[in-house]
Amino acid sequence: MIKTAFIGFGEVNTPIDIIINKCKKAKEDLEKAGVELGACVYPVTDDYEEKDIKKALDELKGKDFDSLVVCIAGWIPTHAVVKITEQYKHLPMVLWGLCGWYEGDRLVTTADQAGTSALRKTFKDLGYRFKYVYDIIGKPSKVESVKSFLAAASAARLLRSARIGMAGYRDMNLYGTLYDGSSLKRVVGPEIETFEMLEMAQRYAKLSSEEINGVIDGEMSKWHFVKEAKKESKELAAGYYLAVKSLIDERGYDAVSLKDVDGMKKLLGFPPAPVFMLLGDVAGVSTIPENDCLGNVTQLMIKYLTGQCGAYLEFYEFFEDSVLAGVPDYVPAEITDGETTVIPAAFGELNEGILNVSKVKTGTITMSRLFYDNGKYYMHSVVGEGKTPPKWEEAGWTQPAPQLPGLKVYLDDAEGFAQNVMCQHYIISYGDNSERINDLCAILGIEILK
């Protein structure tokens, strides 16, 4: 949900009907784009007694919104704007300049960009977190660019209260999946809480056969099994899903990771792929394996920005113009092309599990990864074209080896991406979401690695 406050400004000597109509059109464009207005007030002028300013402050007081749209419909002295915005300097803002129009061969202007150009540096000097957007006569309104920043502001607010559940820590003793709790809370916002796998096992032991069979006969019956799995495998999948879901419901987790290789597989004897599938597709939480802390955080950033699940892929091969990205376990139903397809399979010395072998949707994708380097957070994000890969397999699977889910992602600069790759896991979203990601990072003070 994108919720903002809209304030429209214009100078007291400009014909009031012009300012009202311009602000009304901008406000309606935002609403058509799916933006909810927690408050709306216009026109605000620089009248001598400051009645409009007081009216605006009264209208905004006590209302719920994540950001401000400072809409400049004509020239406005800076003080008239700042007397309002200073009360909300903790919120991200869009400085949006409207534009003039043509009447026959004459250009008519209310000096919108005189107002914004007087304000842009002032906003910067005052330390506001803002985006400057201006419309151009004869071109479509920049409402989508405004919406992008407003979505980022709402995402930033959600991240402040996000909670991630982590079963165990540092699977396989990896370094790239670690995190620093204090800086993550300060800069991005989420809290990562560790729970023990013993809690899962204890809750699993208390489940009834009716509860477990309910998941098997319900959600798992929707999967296409290429080959029937063992009854025990289905029961373990359904049971551990219910055990983790009870922790999610109790503690309000928005994302979850499980200790995979050194935890579920080694200690409990069960590869957790179907557990992740149920948690993502049914419980609606973001999931990633192997205690990938910043992978979970990146997923929530993408989810709150785009509404997509933020699936993870990991890299298998680099080519001159592309990368092969796939998964050795599962993909969410949201990014599956066709039905969810699974097969019982084992890898190396691990016990047999239920492996997802679904096809992945193709198209333009954005691959993103939040990372921490020398005391600072950065976002590595690139846009590419995901295509169905040729037949491939990972050595070690039960023969005939399964075709793992994946994409061959074509990039403008595959070499540049490879030289800057920050982890084996990247989070994908469909479409070019670079503007929203850039906007969120600007709000949070995170540098973008190109």
Image (cartoon, rainbow, N blue to C red):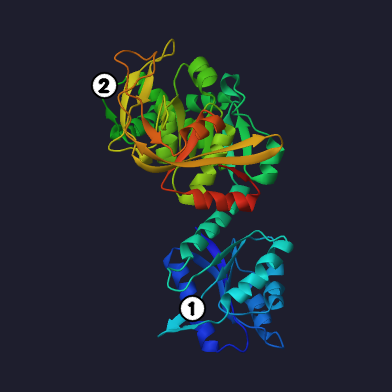
Q: Is residue 447 left or right of residue 280?
A: right
Q: Residue furthest top?
A: 349
Q: Label 2 to label 1, Cα distance in Å? A: 60 Å
The three-letter code of the residue at mark 2 reads Lys
Question: Disc 1 residue type?
Answer: Lys
Q: Residues within 10 Å of mark 2 (few under 14, many from 20)?
A: few
Q: Quadrant of the C terminus?
A: top right
* In the depicted structure, whether residue 324 falls above or below residue 348: below
Relative to residue 25, is residue 96 drawn left or right? right
Q: Secondary structure at mark 1?
A: helix
Q: Nearer the viewer, residue 184 or 249?
A: 184
Depth check: 84 or 339 in front?
Answer: 84
- List x then y, in percent, for residue 376: 69, 39
Relative to 179, say whether 53 is above or below: below
Q: Is residue 290 left or right of residue 180?
A: left
Residue 24, which numbered label?
A: 1
Instruction: Please give the name of the residue rendered at 62% of the width and 76% of the height, measured from the top-left corner.
Output: 114
Q: Which residue does the image show at 58% across and 56% down from the upper left?
A: 153
Q: Earlier in the sequence, mark 2 or mark 1?
A: 1
Tell me where residue 19 appears, x and y as whole percent. 54, 83
Residue 26 in view: yes
